Amino acid sequence: QVQLVQSGSELKKPGASVKVSCKASGYTFTSYAMNWVRQAPGQGLEWMGWINTNTGNPTYAQGFTGRFVFSLDTSVSTAYLQISSLKAEDTAVYFCARDLYGGNSPFDYWGQGTLVTVSS
Amino acid sequence: QSVLTQPPSVSGAPGQRVTISCTGSSSNIGAGYDVHWYQQLPGTAPKLLIYGNSNRPSGVPDRFSGSKSGTSASLAITGLQAEDEADYYCQSYDSSLSGSVFGAGTKLTVL
């Protein structure tokens, strides 16, 4: 069965970096794009962008350029989200979600989410 | 501010029917892009509920239905049950933003 399993919660200090992983199983990793979605405490879903799992080419949504990096390790079917120079406002749950390439495809499977807390 | 507008909350008694609207514009829903709906139970990841405006993934009860017209879409839930209490999000693609967009979400309360 399809599964996206994310790494555990993180507590970081302002200015630090964090790397969240999303390990896929149950399907051919390179047949689907991987998206990242942020959900701040008590807030809605915000699409951060996606990464082409064939080419490794990332696309970032407005507001997620500069400090946010999407990457892959296709040998272990894993996508990564790295956030640098963390700020308090980066505190959120981060989800990975796959979709069939097409831009308007639905996100049919989601990871369980990774809580990143930024606090001094 | 979300590109797709949803009511912050809706409510209904068990057994009743509720609808949740999702209003967009000519660069997203009105441009012909599909609308998808997700259900997020408290403390869990979102789950795909409706895709391609009106299609249900396997396992989703037929109490849930979706429709789209013009620049808007709607999610209808009939025979409301306590377990339907959750947040619901619409999603589409926006050509001006060149990416996916979500509505701000609607909290459904079952009275």
Image: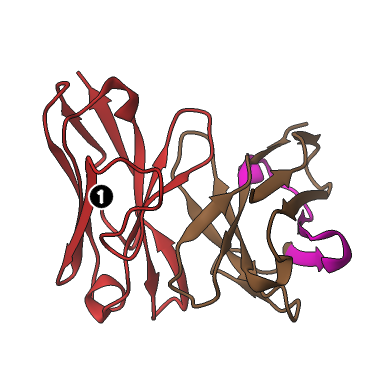
Classify residue B7 by image quadrant.
top left
| Residue B61 appears in view | yes
Residue sitting at x 64%, y 51%: A2
Q: Amino acid at mark 1?
A: Gln
- Asked if residue A92 lies in the magenta stretch, the reply is yes
Image quarter (top left, top right, bottom left or bottom right) of the N terminus of chain B = bottom left
- Indicate the position of residue A45 as horizontal and vertical percent values: 47, 49
Image coordinates for residue A79, horizontal then vertical, percent: 76, 60
Query: Is residue B7 shown left or right of residue B34?
Result: left
Left or right: residue A47 versus residue A34 is left
Q: Residue furthest right?
A: A75
Residue B59's spot in the image, x, y percent? 40, 43
- Residue sticking out furthest to the top: B111
Q: Which chain is brown?
A: A
The residue sitting at 78% across, 50% down in the picture is A21
Q: Write the start and end of the magenta stretch as one range.
A: A69-94
Disc 1: host chain: B
The picture places residue B75, in percent across and down from the top left corner, at 22, 49
Image quadrant containing the C terminus of chain B: top left
Q: Residue furthest left?
A: B16
Q: A28 and B53: which one is in front?
A: A28
Residue at left offset 30%, top offset 40%: B61
Q: Nearer the viewer, residue B62 or B105?
A: B62
Q: Residue at x 39, y 53 (%)?
A: B57
Q: Find disc 1 in the rendering and name its residue.
A: B6
For label 1, the SS is: loop
* Mark 1 nearby-residue class (10 Å; few <14, some 14–19, many ≥20): many
Image colour for chain B is: red
Judge whether residue A20 is colored magenta: no
- Location of residue B77 with respect to B34 vertically, above or below: above
Q: Nearer the viewer, residue B1 or B56?
A: B56
Q: Is residue B8 above or below residue B104?
A: above
